[in-house]
Amino acid sequence: MYPVKILLVDDEIPFVKTLTKRLSRRELNIITAFSGQEALAQLKKDPDIEIIVLDIKMPGMNGLRTLEEIKRDYPLVEVIILTGHSTVDSAIRGMRLGAFDYLVKPCDIDQLISRMQEATEKKRRLDEKWPD
Ligand SMILES: [Mg+2]
């Protein structure tokens, strides 16, 4: 299986940097964005992105709005929502908008990795069904 390319989207820069470092050690190909707008720009630029880990609470375009746009334009990209305790309701709404799953911060890194693996497997199964 070719390495999975993951886009990490969160407005908290230190959080993104720490998580990127930890995930990169597991030989995952991580790219980052610090806002919804930036995430959409990255997606447009890089069609190999398979999984997006998306923060809910971000200034400007929030996670749910970003998710809506992702699912409209890239329906086969799988999105895992990261949420704080105060925004779990939004994360549940995100599931209805087509998110693969949500995790509550601070989340366990092994749990995040296993959800990413499951999301990758699902995406690649769907890619085989509908090749472009
Ligand atoms: Mg945030």
Image (tube, grey):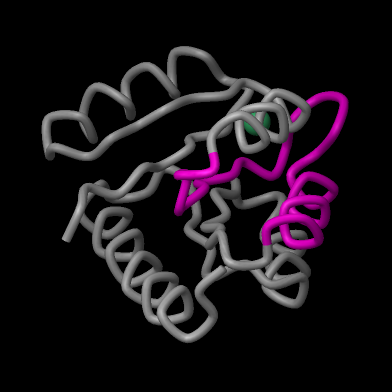
Q: Quadrant of ligand 1?
A: top right
Q: Name the foreground residue: 4 vs 93.
A: 4
Q: Measuring 40% from the left and 68% from the top, which residue is drawn there? A: 119
In the rendered image, residue 52 lying in the magenta stretch gets the answer yes
Which quadrant of the figure has residue 29? top left
In the displayed structure, does residue 24 sit left or right of residue 76? Answer: left
**Residue at 30% over, 49% down:** 4
Q: Is residue 27 shown above or below 93?
A: above
Percent x, y of residue 84: 60, 46
> Which range is magenta?
47-74
Where is residue 35? Give x, y as percent.
70, 25
Q: Nearer the viewer, residue 112 or 89?
A: 112
Tell me the quarter of the picture where residue 21 sits: top left
Question: Where 31 sits versus 54, above or below?
Answer: above
In screen coordinates, is 110 left or right of 105? left
Q: Residue at x 77, y 55 (%)?
A: 73
Q: Nearer the viewer, residue 128 or 33?
A: 128
- In the rendered view, tell whether residue 62 sits above or below residue 52: above
54 in the magenta segment: yes
